[in-house]
Image (cartoon, rainbow, N blue to C red):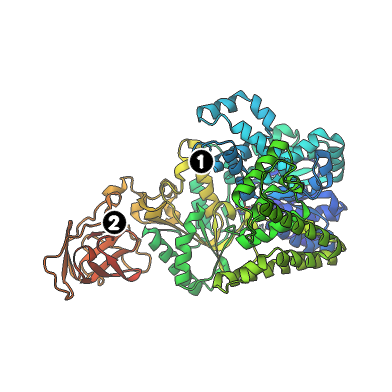
């Protein structure tokens, strides 16, 4: 058996797997088998006799952990594999925190606040403190607090850190530290931890309770970590603490794929390992097994431009493959159209399934136009890491009731449902309750015990309603002691009134909500059954909540089995691979992001991000950029990304325009089209192009940046007969005019109707078909 599975490795990989004498770092480029090494190493350790429950494997997503367990199960059997401590940092350390919660003054069934709970709490604190939320932007405050936690800076330490305080004063937000203090306290009173607390509190647990640390040091005989380049200080310190004594630690990573510095990840964690572990043995892997030569070489040529990196070789012995393709689109709209067309085409020519395709983007907001285009073409897709099942409103409502049943001090859950379904408890009453709770250091739930006695002025009607709500939650708590978990979940959904509320009207949205709630109940049932099968008799609602609250953005895999195109951000794609990859929006101000251009450091991180994106592709990699894009309510134009020029032309098929240095204004738009669909690109003298209705001299269109709508003037005649011309500030449009539209690209005017402001033109667009445009609003130029 042992020999069998080691045969799946090359020599370098095998050496890395077999080395167990001391601390080890496997540092290698994308697709070289780092994750495979880690997986096989665990199998090898199990075969050496290490008990599974003494191996700690930390991955970036739950999905990765499960894949690892499944792979290991093939070698050592499911029974053994399921007893491994394998999971994300957050899931493993929440487990440890639950077991030791009392040491930190928490109950073992503490609630985990997700990002939206945490944001909502920050918002209410800012409001209560009567601060201007334009200055104290809640999302900014949230990320400052998050960064502080990941750097292990608690509020009292923050308050003494002159640098931080000066920074806040300079940015006119001197009270950040105070918000942080209140936030942390309020989480504590609510019996809740946010995601960052799971790491911060583990560190505090280990720091303040050496016996607990020693227990886990002794327990974990070997520690293995994937994607080490993206660990932040809090994670790095936990690993160091646990691994320090025995030094049996194996971490794998690629400095060229470090893409989470905005969350505090520090590339130096990996670079500094040799100092931390004397005798650290470094293994390098050089052969990429994932991608064709053209893809690997393209990625190499890009990353070579980064100065800060560990020199590495990476080569592919797969076939040369197609060149990486770069395609230009006029607009995001056309980009979606091009991508969906190409998916349809590649699916036929390569016999790939939809599952083999991924569309990667820099920001979530980009998915909308892509979704639109895919839907039009009837291409099934899933958004990975988008609004996951558990983020849907009705599910969050039901979960809030679940949470309150387990932990009635949970402030965010209480605020969410105290008046949902509507029961006449208004915002004023809630505000009074919250204020009283915070003044007296109690939870809202405690104040509800005796609102008047606690100083909340309410009339008797409101008092009854509050009492009713409290009794409702009490009844669920009582049910929890009598019913099975699945029954309890159903009781809550029904008795709370949620089900009644969403079945009151049979709208399509409500039907889908109802299905979601039923799916949630199925989920509870299934979870209990699974646990029972693995020998766990008593599964509580609290266990279920613990499980789902740790589903990461990337784990939204409920539909993973179905044949669908995957849409996701580049960040979420880390560690994954797809035969066909599209990277969209490769433009200045988007990729690299407009927010990451201040320093070479930031640009290097954006470059690494593109490196990650390209290296997800196995067979074909297509990059697209749009000359104009609808963002934040307006059309903006940006030149192609600077990174495109850095790709070695030997491996890339790219429109000349993407390499040109001149600013976009000077570029004739017509030349931007890549001729991708088997057509010749336009040229100045391209008068024989069959799509051009009449030969006409080439006129450079107006520069993209100055794209404005063409003012229509009242037509001179007011007949209602179809018109043959309309006069615009920029000249006359006649049937047959060629225009270039900001979103739809090039097209030919086929009809003109109406007069003055109401003039409408019908245009046969080359790529997107027929559209009617109101002259008053349409944004296009004559070409
Ligand atoms: P990333 O940096 O993107 O996380 P990685 O270095 O972790 O990549 P893996 O995901 O482990 O790489 O491997 C990439 C692909 O190559 C996988 O499909 C894996 O199964 C395959 N692979 C790795 N090593 C071998 C090998 N020796 N023989 C055949 N296939 C291999
Ligand atoms: Mg990997």
Left or right, 325 with respect to 472, comes to left
Residue in front for this viewpoint, 342 or 209: 209
Q: Secondary structure at mark 2?
A: helix
Which comes before the other along the chain, label 1 or label 2?
1
Q: Which residue is mark 2?
A: 669
Res 572 visible: yes
Q: Residues within 10 Å of mark 1 (few under 14, many from 20)?
A: many
Is the CB atom of the residue marked by disc 1 within 8 angstroms of ligand 1's nearest atom? no
709 lies left or right of 573: left
Q: Is residue 365 left or right of residue 236?
A: left
Q: Toward which corner of the image does residue 518 lie, by quadrant? A: bottom right
Between the C-alphas of marks 1 and 2, the distance is 30 Å
Q: Residue furthest left?
A: 716
Question: Extreme front residue here?
Answer: 460
Q: Is the residue marked 2 within 8 Å of ligand 1, measured from its CB?
A: no
Q: Residues within 10 Å of mark 2 (few under 14, many from 20)?
A: many
- Quarter of the figure with the N terminus: bottom right
Residue shown at 37%/58% (left/top)? Answer: 331
Q: Position of residue 323 (x, y in %)?
A: 46, 59
Quarter-of-image position of residue 340: bottom left
From what the image shows, is residue 632 above or below residue 279? below
Work out whether residue 327 or residue 399 is closer to the camera in this orientation and state it.
Answer: 399
User: In the rendered image, which residue does mark 1 sit on?
Assistant: 604
Question: Which label number is shown at residue 91?
Answer: none
Q: Residue at x 81, y 59 (%)?
A: 540
Q: Nearer the viewer, residue 609 or 384?
A: 384
Q: Secondary structure at mark 1?
A: helix
In the rendered image, residue 513, in percent from the top left (x then y), is placed at: 61, 68
Position in image of residue 512 (x %, y %): 59, 70
Image quarter hosting the C terminus: bottom left
Q: Does residue 231 show up? A: no
């Amino acid at each position: 058996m042992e020999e069998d599975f080691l045969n799946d490795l090359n020599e370098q990989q095998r050496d890395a797997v077999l080395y167990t004498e001391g601390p080890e770092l496997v540092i290698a480029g994308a697709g070289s088998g780092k994750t495979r090494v880690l997986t096989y190493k665990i199998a090898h350790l199990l075969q050496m006799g290490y008990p599974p429950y003494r191996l700690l494997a930390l991955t970036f997503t739950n999905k990765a952990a499960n894949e690892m367990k499944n792979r290991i199960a093939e070698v050592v059997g499911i029974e053994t594999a399921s007893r491994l401590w394998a999971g994300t940092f957050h899931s493993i350390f929440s487990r440890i925190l639950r077991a030791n919660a009392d040491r930190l003054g928490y109950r073992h069934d503490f609630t985990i606040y997700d990002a939206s709970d945490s944001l909502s709490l920050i918002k209410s604190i800012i409001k209560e403190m009567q601060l201007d939320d334009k200055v104290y932007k809640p999302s900014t405050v949230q990320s400052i607090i998050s960064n502080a936690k990941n750097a292990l800076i608690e509020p009292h330490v923050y308050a003494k850190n002159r640098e931080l305080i000066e920074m806040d004063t300079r940015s006119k937000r001197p009270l950040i530290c105070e918000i942080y203090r209140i936030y942390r306290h309020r989480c504590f009173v609510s019996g809740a931890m946010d995601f960052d607390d799971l790491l911060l509190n583990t560190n505090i647990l280990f720091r303040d309770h050496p016996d607990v640390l020693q227990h886990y040091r002794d327990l974990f005989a070997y520690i293995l970590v994937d994607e080490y380049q993206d660990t932040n200080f809090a994670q790095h310190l936990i690993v160091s603490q646990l691994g320090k004594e025995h030094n049996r630690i194996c971490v794998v990573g690629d400095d060229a794929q470090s893409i989470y510095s905005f969350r505090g990840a520090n590339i130096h964690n990996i670079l500094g390992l040799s100092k931390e572990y004397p005798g650290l043995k470094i293994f390098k892997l050089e052969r990429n097994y994932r991608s064709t030569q053209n893809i690997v070489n393209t990625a190499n040529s890009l990353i070579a431009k980064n100065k800060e990196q560990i020199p590495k070789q990476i080569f592919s012995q797969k076939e040369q493959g197609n060149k990486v393709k770069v395609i230009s689109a006029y607009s995001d709209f056309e980009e979606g159209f091009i991508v969906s067309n190409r998916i349809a085409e590649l699916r036929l020519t390569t016999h790939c399934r939809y599952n083999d395709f991924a569309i990667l983007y820099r920001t979530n907001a980009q998915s909308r136009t892509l979704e639109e285009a895919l839907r039009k073409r009837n291409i099934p897709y899933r958004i990975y890491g988008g609004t996951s099942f558990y983020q849907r409103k009705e599910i969050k409502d039901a979960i809030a009731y679940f949470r309150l049943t387990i932990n009635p001090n949970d402030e965010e859950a209480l605020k969410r449902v105290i008046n949902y379904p509507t029961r006449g408890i208004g915002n004023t009453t809630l505000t009074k309750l919250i204020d009283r709770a915070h003044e007296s250091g109690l939870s809202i739930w405690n104040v509800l015990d005796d609102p008047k006695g606690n100083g909340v002025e309410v009339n008797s009607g409101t008092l009854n309603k509050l009492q009713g709500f409290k009794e409702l939650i009490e009844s669920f708590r009582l049910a929890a002691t009598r019913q099975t978990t699945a029954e309890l979940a159903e009781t809550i959904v029904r008795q709370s009134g949620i089900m009644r509320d969403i079945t009151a009207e049979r709208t399509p949205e409500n039907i889908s909500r109802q299905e979601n709630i039923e799916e949630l109940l199925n989920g509870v049932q299934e979870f209990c059954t699974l646990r029972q099968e693995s020998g766990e008799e008593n599964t509580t609602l609290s266990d279920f909540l613990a499980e789902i609250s740790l589903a990461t953005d990337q784990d939204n895999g409920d539909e993973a089995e179905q044949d669908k195109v995957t849409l996701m951000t580049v960040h979420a794609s880390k560690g994954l691979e797809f035969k066909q990859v599209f990277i969209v929006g490769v433009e200045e101000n988007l990729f690299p992001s407009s927010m990451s251009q201040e320093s070479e450091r930031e640009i290097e991180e954006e470059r690494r991000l593109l490196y990650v994106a390209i290296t997800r592709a196995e067979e074909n990699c297509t990059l697209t950029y749009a000359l104009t894009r609808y963002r934040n309510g307006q059309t903006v134009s940006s030149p192609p990304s600077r990174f495109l020029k850095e790709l070695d032309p030997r491996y890339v098929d790219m429109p000349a325009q993407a390499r040109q240095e001149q600013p976009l204004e000077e570029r004739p738009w017509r030349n931007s089209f890549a001729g991708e669909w088997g057509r010749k690109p336009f040229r100045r003298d391209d008068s024989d192009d069959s799509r051009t209705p009449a030969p006409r001299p080439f006129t450079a269109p107006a520069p993209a940046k100055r794209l404005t709508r063409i003012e229509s003037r009242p037509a001179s005649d007011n007949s209602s007969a179809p018109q043959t011309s309309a006069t615009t500030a920029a000249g006359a449009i006649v049937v047959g005019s060629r225009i270039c539209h900001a979103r739809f690209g090039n097209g030919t005017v086929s009809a003109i109707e109406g007069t003055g402001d109401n003039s409408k033109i019908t245009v046969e667009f080359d790529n997107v078909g027929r559209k009617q445009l109101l002259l008053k609003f349409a944004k296009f130029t004559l070409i």
